[in-house]
């Protein structure tokens, strides 16, 4: 059976380095806010070419604290794609703000930037582009609109470590950016982890304070903060992964090229990459008319798949009784609704064998 993803295969690529780094962290006797975190934060900021990286305990916390640090709250609106994982929206509603959804494109499956301006009101405070699947959104258009209306840009980079738009890394063009290091991500920890990146000194300082109970100095709590600190062991793991990020991204890019070149089934719509984008293929999403029969066919051929995301946030049960709930999503957000009902992610992970890639291609073509 070919797995949809394999964390163990990815781990085994650099097993000795991971184990050495973890053992070093264990033996140091320092497990929170120590040298491993300092090293990773500096290294990741250097990799992106940005001033600040602040390690947190999850990508969701990164979204929540980024929005909080910007002072966005009740009565404010944040523009977000209708087609995304719910964490992107939880970061908004956790702060009491209102998500304002716009549809996805039918080709890249990302935020349709041509719809942003019509969604802006006098309550709009920020645009929250979500760089899904491994591809960056159209940051040129988003920056132009944000500057025109004096809006913040909060980049959700949970799936795009190393992805680019016009030669610039995802996470470097907004006001503030949020990364997840969930184990399946291009740069993954061995548990939950995340970070915020920014070039703004004041915002970085505010996030560092918020992640540590709202305190810069122990027992002196300047604001109502949280406990959201990236621990030393996960930071050590991430430092190893960062050294190999470009290498592991290139593996998936190579597998995706084979998929793109060798899958030739007209019933299967392959992903589209914008000319200005460098896609790192965290996922390989395809669209099919009959998702159930397609997944069943692949499973019968020994191939597991996954769906991203069958219930978009605007249809989530938790938002049905709020102003964020939208019942007629098929009409209002036709592309996001279609993607939610027809997307299937093919196996894609660092450490896949060429034989497994070949088997996936053959199974898809025989559907």
Image: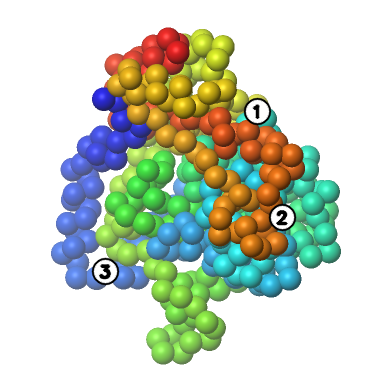
Tell me which colouring the rendered structure shows: rainbow
| Figure check: 294 above or below 179 | above
For the residue labelled by badge 1, is the local secondary structure a helix, a strand or a loop? Answer: loop
Distance Cα–Cα, label 2 vs label 1: 22 Å
Mark 2 or mark 1: name the one nearer the start of the chain. Answer: 2
The residues tagged by marks 3 and 1 sit, at their Cα atoms, a distance apart of 45 Å
Distance from label 2 to label 3 (Cα)? 40 Å
- Check the image and name the residue furthest to the bottom: 219
Residue tagged by mark 3? 31
Mark 3 lies on a secondary structure that is loop
Q: Image quadrant of residue 231? A: bottom left
Which residue is pictured at 34% across the width and 35% down the height?
5
**Residue contact at pointers 3 and 1, CB within 8 angstroms:** no
Residue 167 showing in the rendered view: no
Quadrant containing the N terminus in the rendered view: top left
Tell me the residue that label 1 is attached to. Answer: 107
Query: Image quadrant of residue 83?
Result: top right
Q: Foreground mark, 2 or 3?
A: 2
Q: Is residue 331 left or right of residue 86?
A: right
| Point 46% across, 89% down: residue | 220
According to the image, label 2 marks what residue?
Answer: 100
Instruction: Kindly tell me whether residue 122 is visible in this rendering.
Output: yes
Local crowd at mark 1 within 10 Å, few (<14), some, or many (≥20)?
some
Name above or below for residue 269 compared with residue 240: above
Label 3 environment density (alpha carbons within 10 Å; few <14, some 14–19, many ≥20): some
Q: Position of residue 259 (x, y in %)?
A: 46, 18
Residue 256 image position (x, y, % from top left): 46, 23
Point out the frontmost of discs 3 and 1. Answer: 1
Q: Quadrant of the C terminus?
A: top left
Secondary structure beneath label 2 = strand
Q: For this view, does 176 lie left or right of residue 258? A: right
């Amino acid at each position: 059976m070919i797995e949809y993803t394999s964390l163990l295969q990815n781990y085994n690529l650099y097993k000795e380095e991971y184990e050495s780094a973890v053992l070093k962290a264990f033996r140091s006797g320092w497990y929170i806010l120590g040298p491993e975190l300092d090293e990773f934060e500096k290294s990741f900021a250097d990799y992106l070419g940005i001033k600040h990286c602040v390690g947190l305990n999850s990508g969701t916390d990164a979204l929540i604290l980024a929005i909080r640090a910007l002072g966005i709250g009740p009565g404010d609106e944040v523009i977000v794609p209708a087609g995304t994982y719910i964490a992107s929206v939880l970061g908004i509603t956790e702060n009491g703000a209102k998500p304002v959804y716009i549809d996805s494109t039918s080709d890249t499956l990302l935020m349709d930037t041509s719809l942003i301006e019509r969604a802006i009101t006098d309550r709009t405070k920020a645009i929250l582009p979500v760089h899904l699947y491994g591809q960056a959104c159209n940051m040129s258009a988003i920056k132009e609109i944000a500057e025109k209306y004096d809006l913040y840009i909060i980049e959700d980079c949970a799936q795009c470590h190393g992805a680019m738009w016009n030669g610039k890394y995802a996470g470097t063009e907004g006001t503030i950016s949020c990364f997840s290091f969930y184990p399946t991500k291009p740069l993954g920890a061995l548990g939950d982890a995340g970070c915020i990146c920014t070039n703004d000194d004041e915002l970085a300082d505010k996030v560092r304070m918020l992640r540590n109970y709202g305190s810069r100095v122990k027992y002196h709590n300047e604001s109502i903060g949280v406990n959201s600190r990236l621990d030393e062991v996960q930071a050590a793991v991430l430092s190893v992964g960062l050294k190999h990020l470009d290498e592991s991204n290139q593996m998936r890019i190579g597998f995706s090229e084979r998929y793109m070149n060798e899958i030739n089934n007209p019933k299967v719509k392959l992903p589209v990459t914008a000319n200005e984008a460098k896609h790192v293929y965290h996922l390989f999403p395809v669209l099919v008319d009959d998702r159930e029969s397609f997944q069943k066919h692949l499973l019968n051929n020994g191939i597991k798949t996954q769906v991203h995301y069958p219930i978009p946030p605007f249809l989530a049960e938790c938002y049905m009784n709020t102003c964020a709930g939208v019942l007629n999503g098929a009409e209002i957000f036709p592309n996001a609704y279609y993607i939610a009902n027809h997307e299937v992610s093919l196996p894609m992970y660092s450490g896949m064998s060429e034989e497994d890639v070949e088997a996936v291609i053959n199974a898809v073509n025989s559907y």
